[in-house]
Image (spheres, coloured by chain):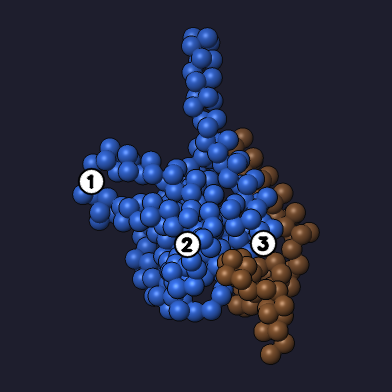
Chain colours: A brown, B blue
Amino acid sequence: MKKYIVLLLFIITGVVALIDEPIADTIDVFSGATNDTYYVSIDTVAGASEDEHEEDDDE
Amino acid sequence: MIVLLIHIIIVVVLAMLFPRKIHKYRWYLYIPFAIFALVLLDSEVNVVTLGFSGAAFFIIVMFTGVLERSKIKTKLLQVRAELAVIGTLLIVPHAVSFLKFVLDDLSISDITLSIVFGILTVLVLIPLFVTSFHIIRRQMTYKQWKRLHQLSYLFYTFLGLHLIFIQNDRMVYYISIFLIYGLLKVSEPLIKSYKQKNTIKNA
């Protein structure tokens, strides 16, 4: 019973995440680039704004 | 979340296919993973330094404990210690790079609950990691080892709180994963006592 609950948990999580997260962002993060889905949230703590991030991307 | 799930799927499939080989040749896995972790200490942001790789191993180790007896559990149990060791090795670049950042660039007022729980997670992980090696485990009695490894529940709690308090888009996933784990774990003694009562009734 428990294994089915765990399996269901991960299947639902996977399906929702697939709908929610763009595949391109997943591929990006595997190749070492951050994006809107996968970013270092500590940047916001350190005061780095989104604008600065965009400027970096343009360079 | 997909990144974490991809890691989980790959590790579970490999653990199911080669449990004996992973156990037998564990040192041939530990050494390259340790070198890999050392190389990544100074690297840019990637799936390892973001903590996804290590977290995936820990989530598998965590859920292995709550599954009922089955083929999957038996196979995963054979490599549980190995998965925990590799998970720890992969969490080192994440912990070191973020700790460096916290010490260098953040003031005390900037420290978030997520960072606090992250540090606590690593502190609890150290004794668990050291005693996961068979050489060290052999020097302890089973009772001592078992008692020490009760800390793993504290570790899972801190890990869950660390992930949840990041408060990013994945917070709901983390809450579901750790909540379901908690419920399954808490329900264990209840199910046991229910089964015992039923056995007595039937007898």
Q: Chain of mark 2?
A: B
- Comes first in the chain, label 3 or label 1: 3
Amino acid type indicated by mark 1: Met
Spatial CA distance of label 3 from label 2 is 33 Å
Residue of label 2: B108
For marks 2 and 1, give the one nearer the viewer.
2
Picture disc at residue B2: 3
- Residue displayed at 60% across by 60% down: B4
> In screen coordinates, is B41 left or right of B194?
left
Q: Is residue A18 above or below residue B138?
A: below
Picture disc at residue B140: 1
Outermost bottom residue: A59
> In screen coordinates, is B182 left or right of A11?
left
Residue B21 horizontal/vertical position (percent): 41, 61
Picture disc at residue B95: none
Asked if residue B169 can be seen in this view, the reply is yes
Residue B37 horizontal/vertical position (percent): 43, 72
Residue B54 horizontal/vertical position (percent): 50, 62
Q: Are marks 2 and 1 on the same chain?
A: yes
Badge 3 crowding class, 10 Å Cα cut-off, few under 14, some 14 to 19, many 20 or more, is many
Secondary structure under tag 1 reads loop
> In screen coordinates, is B51 left or right of B169?
left
Badge 1 crowding class, 10 Å Cα cut-off, few under 14, some 14 to 19, many 20 or more, is few
Secondary structure under tag 2 reads helix
Badge 2 crowding class, 10 Å Cα cut-off, few under 14, some 14 to 19, many 20 or more, is few
Q: Is residue A32 above or below residue B80?
A: below
- Residue displayed at 56% across by 36% down: B184
